[in-house]
Image: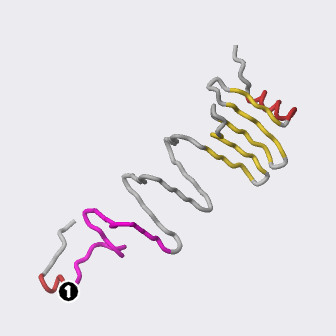
Amino acid sequence: MNNHPTASQLAHALLLRQSSRELLPSGRSVTVLADDHGERVEVRALDGALQLTIELTPTGARLHLDAVDIALRASGTLSAECERFALRARAEARLSAPVTTVESTEGDLTLTAHDDVRARGERVLLNCDREDEVPDWLRDAVDARLPPR
């Protein structure tokens, strides 16, 4: 027989006592709390460290996750929308896709590196939003032409 609480049991405990703490088979604990600041669910590790908090406040929901690894997978689109987005990697950051676009819709786009900035490709085009052309001076000086496409 399963002696672990169901979601409805936790909700019932929340209504009756404004606080409910249950122990999971792993030894972690789940606490459901309600106070003047809103409602929240907390998951704590064996050592008591807070691993997951879901807060339901008057201004909206807030999620805080402290994890060893996080993996997100979507068969369709994974999207995020926010006021500000900050990502900080302590060792390395990578972005990989068959086609990649970085666009600043208003204002500058800044690339900063402690060392070199490398751009590699068949052609590295700067300030180009039209077809490739041989500059007049180069065409006139050495009769330079681009190969046909």
Residue furthest toward the left?
142
The residue drawn where x is 83% and y is 44% is 35
Tell me the residue that label 1 is attached to. Answer: 137
29 relative position to 17: left or right: left
| Quarter in which the N terminus is drawn | top right
Q: Toward which corner of the image does residue 117 lie, by quadrant?
A: bottom left
Residue at position x 56%, y 59% in the image: 85
Q: Is residue 115 above or below residue 87?
A: below
**The disc labelled 1 sits on which kind of residue?**
Trp
**Which of the two residues, 44 or 127, is positioned nearer the viewer here?**
44
Where is residue 36? Give x, y as percent.
84, 48
Q: In which quarter of the image is the C terminus?
A: bottom left
Residue 102, percent across and down? Answer: 44, 63
Find numbered disc 1 in the image and state the secondary structure of the residue it sits on: helix
Measuring 71% from the left and 22% from the top, which residue is drawn there? Answer: 4
Q: Which residue is drawn at 50% across and 41% down?
A: 71
Please give left or right for residue 40 compared with residue 135 in the image: right
- What stretch of residues is rendered in magenta? 108-136
Instruction: Provide residue 25's location: percent of width, then percent of height.
Output: 64, 23
